[in-house]
Image (spheres, coloured by chain):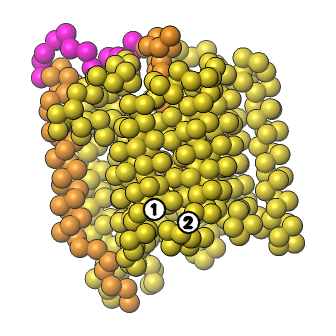
Amino acid sequence: MMERAYNPTRILVALGIILALILADHLRSPTFAFNSGQGNVQTALSQRDESACAPCGAPCPSTRE
Amino acid sequence: MSNSAVLQPGIQPGWQIDRFIVTTALAGFALLGLLIWLETAPFMVALFAIGTVLGMALFHGAFGFTAGWRNLVVKKRGAGMRAQLLLFALSSLIMVPMLNSGQPGLIGNIAPVGTSLVVGSFLFGIGMQLGGGCGSGTLFTVGAGNIRMVVTLIFFIAGAVLGSINLPWWLDQPGFDPVPLVNTFGVSGAILVQFIGLGLIAWWVSRIERKAHGSVERDELLWKGQSHGPLRTLITGRWPFTWAILILAAGNALTLAIGGAPWSVTFAFNVWGAKALEVVGVNMSQFEFWTWDYPAMALKDSVLTNIPSVMNIGLLLGAMLAAGLANRFNEASRNRPEGRQFLAAVVGGLLLGYGARLGFGCNIGALFSGIASASLHAWIWFACAFAGSLIGIRLRPWFRLPN
């Protein structure tokens, strides 16, 4: 029989920290501001609608000579 | 019965899953899926789900690019490598016509060819073997609870941020603009040229295997699981390579159709690292990379709106779920790594991150999605990363890593 190779509490704490970081990041984002009713805010989704740019990190044609 | 292995009612004897891990992964998926649904857009939930399925496919299919390359070099076995080539061929066949169908809003992973690409992919290749995985490999092993790979991931992120700071300098070194093969050969011609290239590599791989063993193992063509029936194989693994190939190819094509660009992993690491530095007071906009439109907005906005980030989180949860279903969560960490193995994770992670940024991605973004976009840079990335990998394999024994 295999012994449990991990501590469930540590797993939950680690995932909880990750979730808290995601929430903290989201709550101070333009998208959250937009969703909260602030107009005239550019978000990643509105930028996506305006221009196609591959997320491979290569410079977009419009941003580097 | 062990603590972690709990027999489920209604499931055939001997079929054990890790209930805690499965429940936690499903709860995480539901919670984050709901958050993404409420705060972003429905298509982001779809991409999150695709990431989860891809994570399951990578884990259950044991689809590691790094091990496949090492098996060819060390054990002279080529099934893993041929499975990758089949994946590239199938994706090329599906995605090159999609990208050139004239449908607006679709863009391929096409990047410049030059010093940055050559150096970056070469460093990435060394890092793959020392760090123990590529971009997707690092993520799915972390999701499956591998402690050493958590160290690799942390330094992968650090290296990626460092690479983003240096990238503009590297781009000023000799090189030329992106080369879409479609511009030269047309859609059918580009697919044909890529098939010929992949076929030649497959022939070379098989020749090495036949020379060493007298025959070629065709594991990459198996359709049935080796030890269980189809349903149990589907849920607990291990999947035949063919299943993983189909899921990964379909996942990348769906990512393109829904997200507008092919699957990419490592850009998210840049964003995560840069956000962490901003939290501790570093102004990232002083660096040119972070003033470009796409990175600047990705840094400013929520990770939940960044496609690679959302898919990576899904991938982590998918691998966790698969590991729980296979009752193998944290399996790789049962033997604690020693000092030099941790050092390999640190050095490998830094090389992976720095190399991925300079090389415009990892095995997924630069190689898999690059070939699926018929971009010349993907082929150069392949050659240079493989050359770097040869050096990494030679360095592994010093770090007490088995070959």
Q: Is residue B263 above or below residue B283?
A: below
Tag 1 and tag 2 share a subunit: yes
Q: CA distance from mark 1 to mark 2?
A: 8 Å
Q: Is residue A14 above or below residue B193?
A: below
Percent from the top left, x then y, of residue A24?
Answer: 15, 39
Secondary structure under the numbered disc 2 in the rendered image: helix
Q: Which mark is residue B140?
A: none
In the drawing, does residue B10 fall left or right of residue B98? left
Residue on which the image places disc 2 = B396
Q: Colour of chain B?
A: yellow
- Mark 2, Cα crowd under 10 Å, few <14 / some 14-19 / many 20+, is many
Q: Split into 4 quadrants, where in the image is the C terminus of chain B?
A: bottom right
Residue B124 lies in the magenta-colored region: no
Percent from the top left, x then y, of residue B400?
Answer: 50, 73
Secondary structure under the numbered disc 1 in the rendered image: helix
Q: Is residue B253 above or below residue B227?
A: above
Q: Colour of chain A?
A: orange
The quarter of the picture where residue B80 lies is bottom right
Q: Magenta region: which residues?
A: A35-50
Percent from the top left, x then y, of residue B203?
Answer: 84, 52
Q: Which mark is residue B344?
A: 1
The residue drawn where x is 52% and y is 24% is B171
Asked if residue B139 can be seen in this view, the reply is no
In the drawing, does residue B355 fall left or right of residue B91? left
The residue drawn where x is 75% and y is 66% is B76
The residue drawn where x is 16% and y is 33% is B281
Q: Nearer the viewer, residue B29 or A55?
A: A55
Q: Split into 4 quadrants, where in the image is the N terminus of chain B?
A: bottom left
In the drawing, does residue A25 fall left or right of residue B336? left
